[in-house]
Each structure stands twice: as C-alpha cells, then as structure tokens.
Image (cartoon, rainbow, N blue to C red):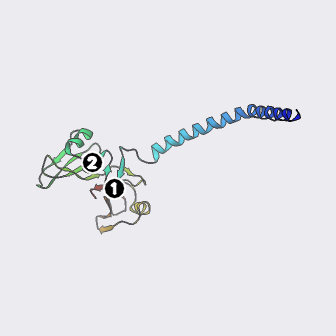
Amino acid sequence: MGEGRTVEFVMERETKNTIKYWPMARGLFVLMFVLCTVLAARAQVGGAPSQSTLIIPGIQLGPIRIGMRPSEVLRILGQPTETHTASPVGWNMGWERYPLWVVFWGPYPGGEVKRIITRSSRFATNQGVRVGSRAEEALRKLGPPLDRAEVSSGGALYYRGLVLEYAPGGRINAIAVDAP
C-alpha cells in the first residue's frame, strides 16, 4: 500500500513540474522557430545561390545546362538580343538583360550548348565565387586550378568545366561554364 502512494506522489510531482515549466518550454520553441526562419531567409538572400543563379562547373550556369538544345534555351530565356552564326562548327546567342552568352556546337540553328558565359555578379558557385570576386578568393574557395594564364590584360583560372577570367587588378570579370 505504501508503494502505491509513493508512485502516486511521484506522478503528481512530475505532472506539477511539467505544468509549471510548460510556458517556458513553449516560449523556447517559439524562439527557436523564429530563429530558424530568420536564418533560412538570410541564407537565401546572402548565402548559397538559388537554382536559377547557381553555377555548377561543367553542368550549368543559372537555368541553362550544358547539352541543352536551342529550343530549350529559347523557352527559358526568350528571344536573344544578338545571334552570331558565322562559324560552320558553332554559333552563339546573347541576352543583354541577364547578361548571358550561350555557345552552341553544331550548324545553325541546331546543335547543343557547349559553353555558357556571364559577366553578371548575380550568378555564383556554391562557394560564393562570382563576377566581382577576387582571383585570390576564388583560389582559396575552389582550390588550385588545372591551369592558369597570366597576360597584360589580366588572366584566367582554368578548372574542370569552369573558366574564371580576371582583370589586371585581380577581379573576376567573366565566368564560363564549359562542357567537361
């Protein structure tokens, strides 16, 4: 009999403690929810780029992927500002509003995307490298390149499926995604 009372007393005490601390637990839950929401929104603004602005070496620059057909690119970007069809092995289209250049391999108007070039800082790699980043920052974030070219007008860092061109001051002024 005494055993049952002890159990009842313990159960009663745990229930009282739970009720006593519930408002504090609920407040912590709300605080954690708000904090996670703010951090997620902040990451979207200044953190990793969204799929529409993401650069993946050898795969995509923003919404355009290596291997796409011209009709797919036109469906996504609309009519180009410029089209150059002079070469028998390839041709390209440019859009000033993005700005993007898409190079196709194959006779006009066919072929498939082999290179995508931008001079816009809106596009970035997962590591945050974008037009306007410094070449030293790109080296730190992406590691050593496969090759590097230095000329009086700047230089270029060559990674697998990615080329970063930079001006004499070391700022990246163009990024190209190439077919691997």
Q: Which residue is mark 2?
A: 100
Helix, strand or loop under label 1: loop
What residue appears at the point 89 percent right and 34 percent down from the top-left corner?
2
Q: Earlier in the sequence, mark 1 or mark 2?
A: 1
- Above or below, 53 relative to 11: below
Label 1, on which residue? 57
Assess disc 2: are there few (<14), some (14-19) or many (≥20) residues with their C-alpha within 10 Å of its C-alpha: many
Image coordinates of residue 8 in percent, x first then y, are 82, 32
Q: Give me the C-alpha separation between circle 1 and circle 2.
A: 16 Å
Q: How many marks on residues? A: 2
User: Which dot, 1 or 2, sits closer to the camera?
Assistant: 1
Q: Position of residue 100 (x, y in %)?
A: 27, 48
In the rendered view, would you say 21 is above or below 83? above
Which amino acid type is shown beneath numbered disc 2? Leu
Which residue is more in the foreground, 63 or 171? 63
Q: Spot the residue most to the front.
A: 1
Q: Quadrant of the N terminus?
A: top right
Does residue 121 appear anywhere in the picture?
no
